[in-house]
Amino acid sequence: MFSLLALPLLAVAAAVPVSRQDSGGVKELWLFNDIRVSDANAIKTAGYDTVIMFQLGIFANASLAYYGDEKGQNDNPVLLVDGGVYVEDIGLADIVTGYKTGTTTIDRTEITIVSGNVFWQRIQAMVEANGTGPDTALYQNFAALKTAWNLDAINDDDEENYDVSSTVAFAQMLGQIGYKFTTAPYTNTFFWAQVGQGINDANLYDRSYLQCYDGGEGNDPGLWAFEVGMPQVPLLWVTNTDKPQDGNTPAQVQSQMQQWKDTYGSNIAGGGLWNDYDIYYNNNSYQTYAQALEAVFG
Ligand SMILES: *[C@@H]1O[C@H](CO)[C@@H](O)[C@H](O)[C@H]1NC(C)=O
Ligand SMILES: *[C@@H]1O[C@H](CO)[C@@H](O)[C@H](O)[C@H]1NC(C)=O
Ligand SMILES: *[C@@H]1O[C@H](CO)[C@@H](O)[C@H](O)[C@H]1NC(C)=O
């Protein structure tokens, strides 16, 4: 968090070399492809330190599911946690815990909850009806998922519901369970600033991954850092066939990330890539993209 007085400092930071940030920084890959389909070993050894799975579903009874079918377009969720018990038995837990074990550069795993399909609406309804105490199904199911997957964080990719108080209460519940809380905004700085102020805990809400493509095209991570009060990890879309004009080669990723880092210094906390599916199906390399991030963020 920083005050309005920090704005002139941003401008100063832009003008001088910033050696303190020359090493370190998030290097993240979004796992859009079904994790059962992708080559986990190739992803583990490419150079990323964080992977974030797309996506976690939540039913009205608080049971949790993985919607990882190819490109996220198959409505065939895998039930993960039901009635407080981890029930999935087709190998997902082994894949997820495996990202951080054996030969790997990954030390942090997350899964995202997106709003387009009512999940944040359901969380709001559950929080308002029953709260977030340890006796609620919501709490117990997220606790069971944490134990089974050894996850580090739950990511909030709310793109539509935008309810501050239930989001803050939910994040605080996640913190009690032992998760970190992260966000993946593309618009609505007012909402995300209120969430940050409501949580008011940089150890719990420790990362903001800013979409700088598609709906977030043109987002300026330095301006966002100022407006929401925390450093940003900008996300770029890799070369793809869905919106080729939004795609970035590894060289373009490196160049854009370097420019943001040179301009905004410590307000850029790393970089991330949307997404593994497009890297693989366009015959590009997880490793070459990871090297583009490593070149900037160490
Ligand atoms: C919760 O809802 C899901 C989806 O409808 C269902 O499969 C599951 O059996 C329900 N679990 C409980 C404990 O009610
Ligand atoms: C609230 O808790 C009650 C009792 O456990 C349960 O029947 C109900 O479905 C819960 N409501 C929501 C919205 O989760
Ligand atoms: C990737 O390579 C495969 C096998 O050579 C080919 O069939 C496919 O069309 C290629 N994909 C793209 C997007 O170029």
Image (tube, rainbow, N blue to C red):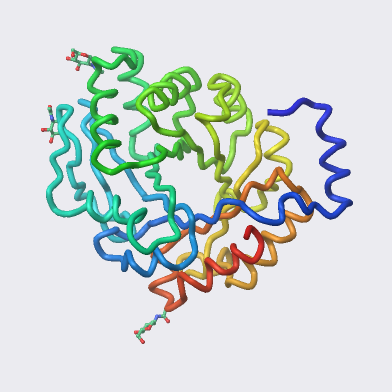
Q: Position of residue 49 (x, y in %)?
A: 48, 55
Front-lying residue, 78 or 93: 93
Residue at the (52%, 73%) spot, across then down: 288
Q: Position of residue 252 (x, y in %)?
A: 64, 69
Residue at the (46%, 75%) spot, across then down: 285
Q: Indicate the quadrant containing the N terminus: top left, top right, bottom left or bottom right.
A: top right
18 to 102, vertically: above or below: above
Front-lying residue, 126 or 40: 40
* 65 sits left or right of 8 in the view: left
User: Quadrant for ligand 1?
Assistant: top left
The quarter of the picture where residue 253 lies is bottom right
191 to 268, vertically: above or below: above
The quarter of the picture where residue 99 lies is bottom left
Q: Indicate the quadrant containing the C terminus: top left, top right, bottom left or bottom right.
A: bottom right
Residue at the (19%, 47%) spot, across then down: 78
Q: Position of residue 201 (x, y in %)?
A: 56, 24
Q: Position of residue 59 (x, y in %)?
A: 23, 32
Residue at the (58%, 21%) spot, across then down: 200
Number of numbered discs on residues: 0
* 296 sits left or right of 120 in the view: right
Q: Determine the residue located farthest toward the front in the rendered image.
A: 102
